[in-house]
Image: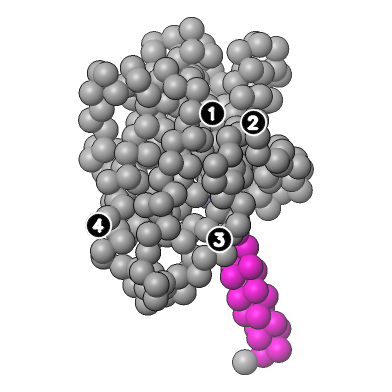
Amino acid sequence: MKFTTALLSVFLFLTTTASDNIYWGQIGHRTIGHIADGKLSKKARKQVKRVLGSETLAEVSTWMDEIRSDNAYRYANTWHYCTIPDGMTYETAPKQKGGDVIWAIEKIIKELKSGKLSAEQEAINLKFLVHLVGDIHQPLHVGNGTDRGGNDVKVKWFGTDTNLHSVWDSRMIDGKQFSYTELADWVNHPTKTQVKEWQSASVRDWAMESMSYRDQVYKAPESGRLSYRYSYDNFDLVKQRILQAGVRLAGVINEIYK
Ligand code: ADE
Ligand code: ZN
Ligand code: ZN
């Protein structure tokens, strides 16, 4: 192996193992965007088209991950998650430097509602919103403060070294081998009552819900070897959180552009 190739592999190894997972995988985010797209009011649909042009909510949903490599957006690096220790609430938990996912969603919605953003900033805000409403529904994006949202919990997923956060972001979902439209078709069957209830909850409620699943999420074999059984026990919750995120994203966008 040439020296440069060796150096590159060392670098790739270090960067891929050291970097945190801070987003639902692409399928999760796109599914949420796709579900929301189908629930927009006529008015909101028109405004979204004005802001995003030819791109759909599903297509822009992962943009906030792509810009993590762009220093111009470094200010948003901490916006994907928040930390609320067991027994605390958002209000009593220590404030996160740089902003957290709850603060960011509330701020973004307020700015969009003001109608005072430039066209460019409005598009940025809308793309951030699509992504972050997804993130806050991933239970481990509301961390307990001990393990960086499960990033420090090393596990083996079907024999491959990874961590609990990654299992929830993407590994369970990717294991199903669905496209995002297929996953949307599968989960997109809320009752009218569910839509009403879900859309009337606040951003802070969404985070408290995520916290409430901690016992279930951390209930893993001592060995750290996760496979079929963990997915069997948890995939219904993955589906539920994706559906809730999609339904609520549509609710928020409809409210912004009403
Ligand atoms: N870093 C610290 N807490 C985190 C979380 N809950 N999710 C992702 N990254 C984190
Ligand atoms: Zn994540
Ligand atoms: Zn994210």
Residue under pointer 4: 232
Q: Do the residues labelled 2 and 3 touch (CB within 8 Å)?
A: no
Q: Distance between the residues labelled 4 and 3?
A: 21 Å
Q: Main secondary structure of the magenta part?
A: helix
Mark 2 CB within 8 Å of ligand 1: no
Q: What residue type is labelled 3?
A: Asn
Q: How far apart are marks 1 and 4 (CA)?
A: 29 Å
Q: Where is residue 78 in the image (x, y as percent from the top left)?
A: 67, 44
Front disc: 1 or 4: 1
Along the polypeptide, which appears first: circle 4 or circle 3? 3
Q: What residue type is labelled 2?
A: Glu
228 drawn magenta: no
Quadrant of the rendered structure where residue 105 is?
top right
Crowding near pointer 1: few (<14 within 10 Å), some, many (20+)?
Answer: some
Q: Which residue is drawn at 25% across and 57% down?
A: 232
Mark 3 CB within 8 Å of ligand 1: yes
Quadrant of the rendered structure where residue 191 is?
top left
Q: Which amino acid does label 4 sit on?
A: Tyr
Q: What stretch is highlighted in magenta?
A: 2-20
Front disc: 2 or 1: 2
Residue under pointer 1: 204
Residue under pointer 2: 91
Q: What element carries label 2?
A: loop
Along the polypeptide, which appears first: circle 2 or circle 1? 2
Mark 4 CB within 8 Å of ligand 2: no
Residue positioned most to the front = 87
Front disc: 1 or 3: 1
